Image: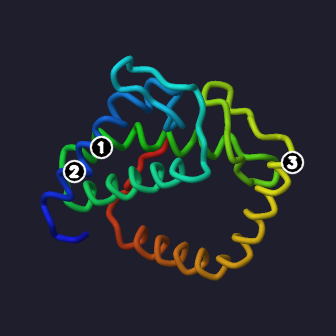
Amino acid sequence: MTGDPRLLEWARRIAGAYIEEVLPGNGGVPASRWNFTTHSGDGRLRLRDHGNETVVGLTMLFTLEHALQTPRAERYAPVIQRMLDRILASANGDGLLYNEIDAAALHPLDESGNRRRALSRVRSTAMRTRSKARSISSTVSQSRRRSTGSILKPT
């Protein structure tokens, strides 16, 4: 993306730690807290703050590795697919995501007043970005039609 190989190597080192240790050790999703010394986490996924950035960063790096046709893309694909599937499986009946979920059971841990505020923020954000999402969806659809195969194979 920037063309700086140091940044790509740094992203790969971070992703490697998540792909090989954190995601498998936390039910397939990023942990809100992970101790690399004890190789254990808190069993939670927090999509507020930096949790969502971890998901986006791992997905973006996977997409870059796929575009570069590196062996990492093939190794990352099933792990990223599982992460995204589990996050989507944790959504409520309206398809909205919670601030924080139990990584194993995928049930919300923030059903207090935070839930109402979080859902209100999500709805507000969704309304503001609806046209952007349609544009992105259209671009992805066009890209898929041009592609000879799927980036992520269904499991």
Dot 3 crowding, Cα within 10 Å, few <14, some 14–19, many 20+:
few
Label 3's element?
helix
State left or right for residue 110 relative to residue 129: right
**117 or 68: nearer the eye?**
117
Residue tagged by mark 3? Answer: 113
Where residue 33 appears, x then y in whole percent? 50, 33
Quadrant the N terminus occupies? bottom left
| Tag nearer the camera, 3 or 2 | 3
User: Of the residues shown, which amino acid type is indicated by label 2?
Assistant: Trp
Dot 2 crowding, Cα within 10 Å, few <14, some 14–19, many 20+:
few
State left or right for residue 153 relative to residue 51: left
Q: Are marks 2 and 1 in contact (CB under 8 Å)?
A: yes
State left or right for residue 33 relative to residue 65: right
User: Of the residues shown, which amino acid type is indicated by label 3?
Assistant: Gly
Disc 3 to disc 2, C-alpha distance: 39 Å
User: Of the residues shown, which amino acid type is indicated by label 1?
Assistant: Ile
Disc 1 to disc 3, C-alpha distance: 34 Å
Q: Residue at x 49, y 72 (%)?
A: 141
**118 or 61: nearer the eye?**
118
Of pointers 1 and 3, the one earlier in the residue sequence: 1
- Classify residue 147 by image quadrant: bottom left
Q: Residue at x 27, y 47 (%)?
A: 73
Q: Residue at x 45, y 20 (%)?
A: 40
State left or right for residue 8 relative to residue 56: left
Disc 2 to disc 1, C-alpha distance: 6 Å
Q: Residue at x 50, y 27 (%)?
A: 26
Of pointers 3 and 2, the one earlier in the residue sequence: 2
Label 2's element?
helix
Residue tagged by mark 2? Answer: 10
Residue tagged by mark 1? Answer: 14
